[in-house]
Amino acid sequence: SQQGEEDPQALSIQEGENATMNCSYKTSINNLQWYRQNSGRGLVHLILIRSNEREKHSGRLRVTLDTSKKSSSLLITASRAADTASYFCATDSASGTYKYIFGTGTRLKVLA
Amino acid sequence: DTGVSQDPRHKITKRGQNVTFRCDPISEHNRLYWYRQTLGQGPEFLTYFQNEAQLEKSRLLSDRFSAERPKGSFSTLEIQRTEQGDSAMYLCASSHPGDRELNSPLHFGNGTRLTVT
C-alpha cells in the first residue's frame, strides 16, 4: 500500500525554471524524506525533514512540511536537465516501526 | 563506504521456478529493507530487519516469499514458484540509525530486475 500520494504525477519544465512537487500522507509521522530515482537505478536520498520542522533547505532544494494538513512540498530551483528523474516522498510512522512507505512519485522532465 | 550491493542485476526465469536475490548492505548498517517496485509506481515495502531479526513483513508478501539475514550482515530474498505477477524491480536498502534512531535515511542498491516468463 502507498502511504503518500505525489502531485503532479508528471511535470515537464524548461531548464532554469523552478519545479514544485507535493506529497500528501495519511498517518502521523516522525519524519518525511524525499528521494530521487533515475531510470533503472536505485533511489538516492535527497533530504529529511522531522515532524517538528516546517522548512528545510539543501542547495537548490527546499522542503516544507505541514503536519496539520499531512502534506509536504519539494521545490527545486533553477532546474537543470540533469534533474530529470522521478521524485518520491517517504514517511515513517509515529507508531514506532521503522519502515518507510513511499508515495507514487512525480516524474520530472527538464527540457534543455 | 562501498554502497549497497545487489546481485544479480537482472534475472529472467520461467514461471514456477525459484529465485534468490542477495543484498550486501553498507557495513555497520544494522537495518536492512526489501522493497518491490513495478513500472511507474513507488517502491512497495516488503520487509525489514534490525540486525538478524525480521521485525516486520508486509501482509502483501505471500508465503512464497521469504527473507533472511542470518548473521545480521547480508540478506537474501527468495521467491518460490514464481508467477508472472512477481516481475518487478526488487530493491534493497540499509540504514544506520546512529544517535537519532528515528531519523535515518535509506541507502538503496541499484536493484535486481526480475522477469518471469
Image (cartoon, coloured by chain):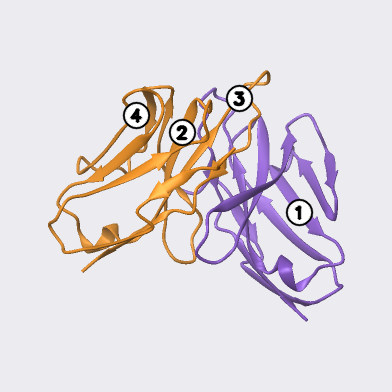
Which residue is at the far front?
A: B2
Mark 3: few, some, or many residues within 10 Å (few <14, many ≥20)? some
Amino acid, disc 4: Arg
Q: In this structure image, what is the colour of chain B?
A: orange
Disc on the earlier residue, 3 or 4? 4
Q: Which chain letter goes with mark 1?
A: A
Q: Which chain letter goes with mark 3?
A: B
- Chain given the colour purple: A
Evaluate if marks 1 and 4 touch, with contact meaning CB atoms under 8 Å apart.
no
Q: Quadrant of residue A91?
A: top right
Q: Residue shown at 66%/42% (left/top)?
A: A33
- Tell me the SS state at disc 3: loop
Disc on the earlier residue, 2 or 4? 2
Amino acid, disc 1: Leu
Q: Relative to B111, is A31 above or below?
A: above
Q: Name the residue under label 2.
A: B32
Q: Residue shown at 44%/53% (left/top)?
A: B111
Question: Marks 2 and 4: same chain?
Answer: yes
Evaluate if marks 1 and 3 touch, with contact meaning CB atoms under 8 Å apart.
no
Q: Mark 4 points at which residue?
A: B69
Report, in whole angstroms, how far the alpha carbon at label 3 lies from the one at label 4. 18 Å
Evaluate if marks 2 and 4 touch, with contact meaning CB atoms under 8 Å apart.
yes
Give residue B59's position: percent from left, percent from top: 33, 38
Question: Marks 1 and 4: same chain?
Answer: no
Q: Mark 1 points at which residue?
A: A74
In screen coordinates, is A63 left or right of B117? right
Report, in whole angstroms, how far the alpha carbon at label 1 lies from the one at label 4. 35 Å
Which residue is at the far bottom?
A: A112
Q: Residue shown at 81%/33% (left/top)?
A: A53
In screen coordinates, is B30 left or right of A79? left
